[in-house]
């Protein structure tokens, strides 16, 4: 089983920044795509950003230009750098790792989430 762990959430003022980290451990052979999702109370879970194993990135329109998703190869993690944070960014942020435990077998793995609160 693959374990996914998010970290870096917290309380930040509007206009501030936070850096979220997603790490995967276990019997994973390769990673196809990693996505950051978020869910606020009373709202649907939404996709924030994705990055493929080859480094191709995509962003939701609501965060484009403010958030950056990247790979930290030294730590084998995926980073979500969030800047110019707004109160509407407040949510629990989840990391989803889609990878392979062999050349042919794929799986989708979720972390438990990390709380991001943007408030003055």
Image (cartoon, rainbow, N blue to C red):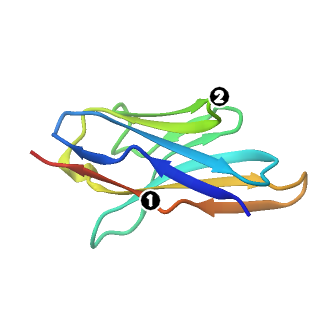
Residue 113 badge: 1
The kind of secondary structure element at disc 1 is loop
Please state which of residues 17 and 87 is positioned toward the viewer in this rendering.
17
Instruction: Locate residue 46, reporting x and y percent.
Output: 42, 59
Mark 1 neighbour density, 10 Å: few (under 14) some (14–19) many (20 or more): many
In which quadrant will I find the N terminus?
bottom right
In the depicted view, which residue is nearer to us: 3 or 59? 3
Residue neighbourhood size for the residue with mark 2, other residues' Cα within 10 Å, grouped as few (<14), some (14–19), many (≥20) = few
Q: Residue at x 54, y 59 (%)?
A: 111
Residue at x 74%, y 52% (from the top left corner): 99
> How far across and down, in percent of the image, does residue 110 sit?
57, 61
What's the residue at 85%, 60% (across, down)? 105
Quadrant where the image shows the C terminus: top left
Residue 66: x and y in percent read 33, 33
**Residue tagged by mark 2?**
73
On screen, residue 44 above or below 60: below
Please tell me whether mark 2 sits on a helix, a strand or a loop.
loop
Q: In the image, 85: left or right of 29?
A: left
Q: Which mark is residue 95?
A: none
Q: Can you say whether 81 is above or below 113 in the image?
A: above
Between residue 56 and residue 14, name the one nearer to us: 14
Query: Residue at 70% across / 59% down in the picture?
Result: 2
């Amino acid at each position: 089983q693959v374990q996914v762990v998010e970290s870096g959430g917290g309380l930040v003022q509007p206009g501030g920044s936070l850096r979220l980290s997603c790490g995967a451990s276990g019997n994973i052979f390769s990673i196809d795509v990693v996505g950051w999702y978020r869910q606020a109370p009373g709202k649907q879970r939404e996709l924030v950003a994705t990055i493929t194993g080859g480094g191709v990135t995509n962003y939701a329109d609501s965060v484009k230009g403010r958030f950056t998703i990247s790979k930290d190869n030294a730590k084998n993690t995926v980073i979500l750098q969030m800047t110019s944070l707004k109160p509407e960014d407040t949510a629990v942020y989840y990391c989803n790792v889609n990878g392979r435990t062999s050349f042919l077998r794929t799986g989708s793995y979720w972390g438990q989430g990390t709380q991001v609160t943007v408030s003055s």
